[in-house]
Image (cartoon, rainbow, N blue to C red):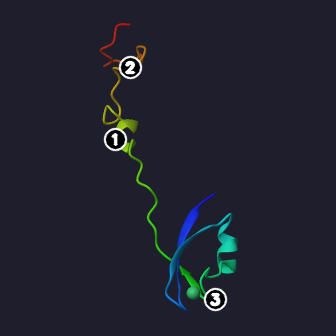
Amino acid sequence: MPMYDFECEECGVNFEQLVRRESDIPMVTCPACSSARVAKAISLPAAPVNSAMAMPMGGGGCGVGPRCGKPWCQRTG
Ligand SMILES: [Zn+2]
């Protein structure tokens, strides 16, 4: 369940709100003044810290795991 940052356009308070669905966002109200005029703040999703580890060989290289069978495969096991 994603947590969104909101900013109230009435009193300017910033708050976080759990939103089950995107369609529930218009129903979010300000916790301070109960105004429905809240704007969803832009919050970047957390960067995947393991993106560099997803393709350790830079793409296309074997060398991990069993012999891949390609003509250029250096693995003998
Ligand atoms: Zn408010």
Circle 1 — which element? helix
**Residue located farthest toward the top when viewing the structure as drawn:** 77
Ligand 1: does it lie within 8 Å of the C-beta at label 3? yes
Pointer 3 or 1: first along the chain? 3
Mark 3 or 1, which is nearer the eye?
3
At label 2, the amino acid type is: Lys
Q: Nearer the viewer, residue 61 or 49?
A: 49
Circle 2 — which element? loop
Pointer 3 or 2: first along the chain? 3
Residue position marked by numbered label 3 in the rendering: 35
- Percent x, y of residue 56: 33, 33
Residue position marked by numbered label 1 in the rendering: 52
Relative to 48, residue 28 above or below = below
Mark 1 or 2, which is nearer the eye?
1
**Residue located farthest toward the bottom when viewing the structure as drawn:** 10
Residue position marked by numbered label 2 in the rendering: 70
Name the side, left or right, on which 66 lies relative to 72.
Answer: right
